[in-house]
Image (cartoon, helix red, strand yellow):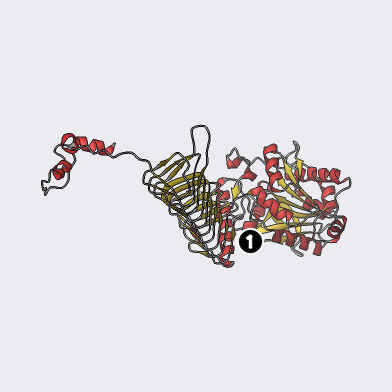
Amino acid sequence: MSNQDETTHLGDPDVPAAVIVLAAGAGTRMKSRTPKILHRIGGVSMIGHALRAARALEPRELAVVVRHERDRVAEHIGSVDPAAVLIDQDEMPGTGRAVQVALEGLDARTGNPVSGTVVVTYGDVPLLTPETLRRLVTVHHGEGNAVSVLTAVLEDPTGYGRIQRHEEDGTVLAIVEHKDASPEQRAIREVNSGIYAFDAAVLRRALTQVDASNAQGEMYLTDVLAIARADGGRVAAVVQADRWQVEGANDRVQLAALGVELNRRVVEQWMLAGVTVVDPATTWIDATVVLEEDVTILPGTQLHGGTVVARDAVVGPDTTLTDVVIGEGAHVVRTHGSGARIGAGASVGPFTYLRPGTVLGEDGKIGAFYETKNVTVGRGSKLSHLGYAGDAEIGEYTNIGCGNITANYDGVDKHRTVIGSHVRTSSNTVFVAPVSMGDGAYTGAGAVVRKDVPAGALAVTDAAQRNIDGWVAQKRSGSASATAAAGTPSTDSPTSTPTEEKSTQA
């Protein structure tokens, strides 16, 4: 950031001095070897969602407090937001201590105490939006609060800290944790989200007065509110009507519920942007997917990762795509694909498997029961049905016949097949790589291509056909086939001898 940009940020009251994301917990209720905040919904980790919302505030510093599975979490955070500052929580438990070590770390980093607004949020509230955080900061500044807390009103507030308000002016007196609350306090339905905007100086002073004399034996960040009020500061609540934004995920049930709600919102967003989703209930779209107007998504479709779908394309039904780019007007039906590119006007499926490196040109076709991998298919070329193309390059307007495969693996190394433009291959052709086929060439049915085929040539595998007369009468005597071969009419339904049945099963 330039000095001019930094000066502008310092003068903007709605730009916080720091955002602190708390992400040190073990998340034992997940019962997982994966740290809780690394679990994903909508194609993004929970900490990824949290960092995206925090970074949108453009704070001068963005700090993440870590502890459990520290190195693994740090590596992931580095891939999501390389500029985030990692702060290690020490042995003292509690959110209050986590924020305290974060402030100490940021003070040491800048060489001066952090001043201004400090926002505190969590790594496991994936539906929290930047707009909600901005509103919290705006209200905090506008009312001149020492502390502002984001709250929600819940039908069942069990497990949440309760908001105690002043009867006359509605300001916040204190937050009482559920385990420490009296029956009267537990009847309160307004709850603490754990998301705050603090005046940094107030926060720093109050944390020195917080102790661990509570049911959990932890330094509660919530104690700061009562301390700030006792020191004459104004403490206020900002009610968030959308409870999902302050919901965290402590177990797989809550994670799934958040995932369903996030997907509902993503699908709705795309429909409002001009995408037709025939059955929203069976359609899953990651938060990272990009769709253009007039795309149609048919039932049973999942779009993941960096998938991009251009205008007028139709995807589905029963299709799962990850990191696939689909061109304008293309059709992809009953396909499983990843890391592929599909050109404009092309068609794929049904029952097609696109593996990474597949590139299908404009107006091309990869049809039913086809598998492709690391293959480039030129404009207008067709791989219509029942085949495999791997480690291959296919030119333009070529037609690959039914049952063709590229035999690309010799047991040790992979090899490439190169097929030119305007080529016609017959059924059951096998290309034994490395091999090439020139423009305009043909193959005969059942050809095994082991040598390069010149342009305009016909490749055939010449093996003379041999007929064994009388074989059925000798080997399948008494069968329906033997009767038919002998020219004897039969009114009985066809039956199989035990020998024939065994042969058929084999």
- Check disc 1 and report the residue beneath it: 242
Residue 119 appears anywhere in the view: yes
498 vs 386, nearest the viewer: 386
Q: Position of residue 272 (x, y in %)?
A: 58, 67
Q: Position of residue 406 (x, y in %)?
A: 46, 43
Q: Quadrant of the N terminus?
A: bottom right
Task: State which quadrant residue 174 falls in.
Answer: bottom right
At x 74%, y 44%, the residue is 65
| Classed neighbour count for the residue bearing mark 1: other residues with Cα under 10 Å, few (<14), some (14–19), many (≥20) | few
At x 46%, y 39%, the residue is 451
Residue 271 as seen in the image, left or right of residue 26: left
Quick check: 176 above or below 431?
Answer: below
For badge 1, the amino acid type reads Asp
178 vs 281, nearest the viewer: 281
Q: Position of residue 389 (x, y in %)?
A: 48, 46
SS type, badge 1: loop
Residue 188 appears anywhere in the view: no
